Image (cartoon, rainbow, N blue to C red):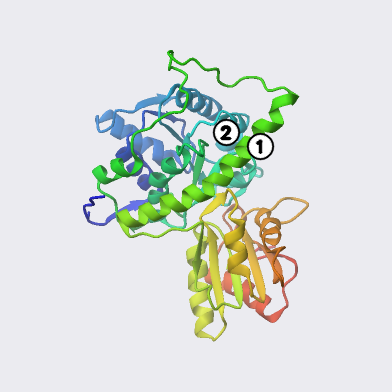
Amino acid sequence: MAKKKLEDIAINGDGAVAYAWKQIDPDVCAAYPITPQTIIVEDFSKFVANGEVKTEYVCVESEHSALTLCAASCSAGARTFTATASQGLAYMWEMLPITSAMRVPVVMAVANRAVSGPININNDHGDAMAARDTGWIQMFADNVQSAYDNAIIAPRIAEHPDVQLPIITNLDGFILTHAVERMTPIDTEDVKKFVGEFEPVCPLLDYKHPTSHGMLDGPDFYYAHKHQQVEAMDKALEVSEQVFKEFKKLTGREYHLVDEYRCDDAEYVAIILGSSYGTMQETVDQMREAGIKVGAAMPHIYRPWPEKELARIMKGKKAVAIFDKHVSLGAYGPMYSEVVAAAADLEKMPKMYNFIYGIGGADTSVSILKGAMESIVKGTADKINYAGMKL
């Protein structure tokens, strides 16, 4: 594929997502503002107003309406994008499993933000985790560059004939949505070639081949219907790996189901999501300078869960620290139990520790992460720990 090299630009995460959408030029965009994703739909509205895209831009009256519109327009055969955060995603909840069950590849950016209450507009992963069992593929970004790249990669995974599932591209609210970083864009012509034309499966408006959408499922078929979604999710892992390889050929930028940093010879590994992955990499470097063999890993694809890749990374390690920016009240961090399950088949299971951190925008510094990692090296950590919490 031919590629043109463009100059780097300074842009925030929301702007980067909007820029990617401009280059893709989707058929429909449903817009309802909510902090901290508002910049995405605002910036995109300017592209629409200036005639830079042909997108049908629909201002709806709520997030529930936004996703309802997305499911309908994508069923009709239109490539459809939207964006939300926190309470907005919660307000969409009724439509989340319906959209995935209809097997329509809607793309939605989620600017991760704490879910009320108490009211808090800062970053954590409570919104994404509440949506994890609704049948949507989920990707996480660790910086502005990957937020932009994920927006371009997402439709390729979602629209693959073997997948046909909606997808969420997560980016940490304010940390990535509002912070300006250096980003290398892709030429628009190359983006369009990479993403390709939308080829809807059984579109509602194909009157020559009429189909029914969103039908009732009785007990005879509901279970089998859900299993079809399970199979599609399983396929999404394989498809994602292939799309990542194609993206690397286009840009030189490399992504994996699980991105990893200095894990090969590590004795201790931290597993973490989102922008904190970069902070953890700095933590790893500082601890390595002190002679402590640590590494870091981030599930780039969170749903479907990349269990085999995580098991490979954890094999032979002394201990694993799982950092959750959310807590399942009454239990522990949501990623902890899944990582423990991924390690269950290892011949020798590492010691497993859970660190809850960054809830509602609580500080996530190198010193906090370093203190957590040092506690697992010393064996002083508890099974469940609350890192950086101020009482």
Q: Is residue 120 visible?
A: no
Q: Earlier in the sequence, mark 2 or mark 1?
A: 2
Q: Which mark is residue 227?
A: 1
Spatial distance from mark 2 to mark 1, Cα to Cα?
A: 12 Å
Who's the residue at 43% across and 13% down the image? 207
Who's the residue at 29% across and 40% down the image? 192
Q: Is residue 214 visible?
A: yes
Q: How many discs mark residues in the rendered view?
A: 2
Q: Quadrant of residue 199?
A: top left
Q: Amino acid at mark 2?
A: Ser
Q: Quadrant of residue 191?
A: top left
Residue 331 on image: x %, y %: 76, 54
Residue located farthest toward the right when viewing the structure as drawn: 330
Residue that mark 2 sits on: 100
In the displayed structure, would residue 130 be above or below residue 183?
Answer: above
Residue 77 on image: x %, y %: 42, 24
Who's the residue at 71% across and 71% down the image? 347
Q: Amino acid at mark 1?
A: His
| SS class, disc 2 | helix
Looking at the picture, tell me which residue is in the foreground, 237 or 277: 237
| SS class, disc 1 | helix
Screen quadrant of the C terminus: bottom right
Who's the residue at 31% across and 38% down the image? 22
Residue 338 on image: x %, y %: 68, 56
In the displayed structure, would residue 350 be above or below residue 23?
Answer: below
